[in-house]
Amino acid sequence: MLKPRPVNHHRMFLTCYEDTLNYGWHHVDLFVHDEYGREVNWVHWTVEADGPEAADVSVRREEPLLRRTTDWEPKTSAVGAPYWTAEAAWDADS
């Protein structure tokens, strides 16, 4: 049993990818973590192309009230595939 139980949605971040394995699935993930770093929820959607530029276009189209709050940070997965992460938040005016 997890203690304490994750109940607070503390951090949201976007992740986008480069399809170096040629799966043909270009997508963006929005992850929600609690204050202990545990994943609480996530959602993903298809984009037209790989990388941060396509991710930004898709976020504006699919979730216009969601905004990226940090620059995209490049990373590399365990299998050598490039991906990027950026913090995100819902627009405070919404």
Image (cartoon, rainbow, N blue to C red):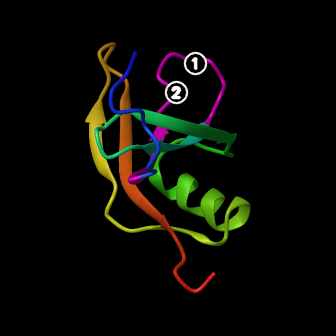
Q: Which mark is residue 22?
A: 1
> Does the magenta-highlighted stretch encompass residue 74?
no
Residue at the spot x=34%, y=55% of the render? 72
Residue 23, relative to residue 47: is it above or below?
A: above
Span colored in magenta: 10-26
Q: Give the x, y percent position of residue 93.
A: 58, 86
**Measured Cα–Cα span from mark 1 to mark 2:** 5 Å
**Under tag 1, what secondary structure?**
loop
Residue 44, relative to residue 88: is it above or below?
A: above
* Quarter location, residue 57: bottom right
Judging depth in this view, the residue of 7 and 25 nearest the camera is 7
Residue at the spot x=47%, y=43% of the render? 7
Q: Give the x, y percent position of residue 43.
A: 63, 40
What kind of residue is marked 1?
Answer: Asn
Q: Tell me the crowding category of disc 1: few under 14, some 14 to 19, or many 20 or more residues within 10 angstroms, Cα based.
A: few
Q: Tell me the crowding category of disc 2: few under 14, some 14 to 19, or many 20 or more residues within 10 angstroms, Cα based.
A: some
Q: Quadrant of the N terminus?
A: top left
Residue at the spot x=37%, y=46% of the render? 85
Pointer 2 residue: 19
Residue at the spot x=68%, y=46% of the render? 48
What kind of residue is marked 2?
Answer: Asp
Residue 87, relative to residue 14: is it above or below?
A: below
* In this picture, residue 70 sits left or right of residue 58: left
**Under tag 2, what secondary structure?**
loop
* In this picture, residue 41 sits left or right of residue 47: left
The answer to whether the residues at label 1 and label 2 have Cβ atoms under 8 Å apart is yes
Judging depth in this view, the residue of 4 and 21 nearest the camera is 4
> Does the magenta-highlighted stretch encompass residue 19?
yes
* In this picture, residue 33 sits left or right of residue 45: left
Q: Quadrant of the C terminus?
A: bottom right
Q: Give the x, y percent position of residue 90.
A: 54, 69
Q: Give the x, y percent position of residue 47.
A: 67, 45
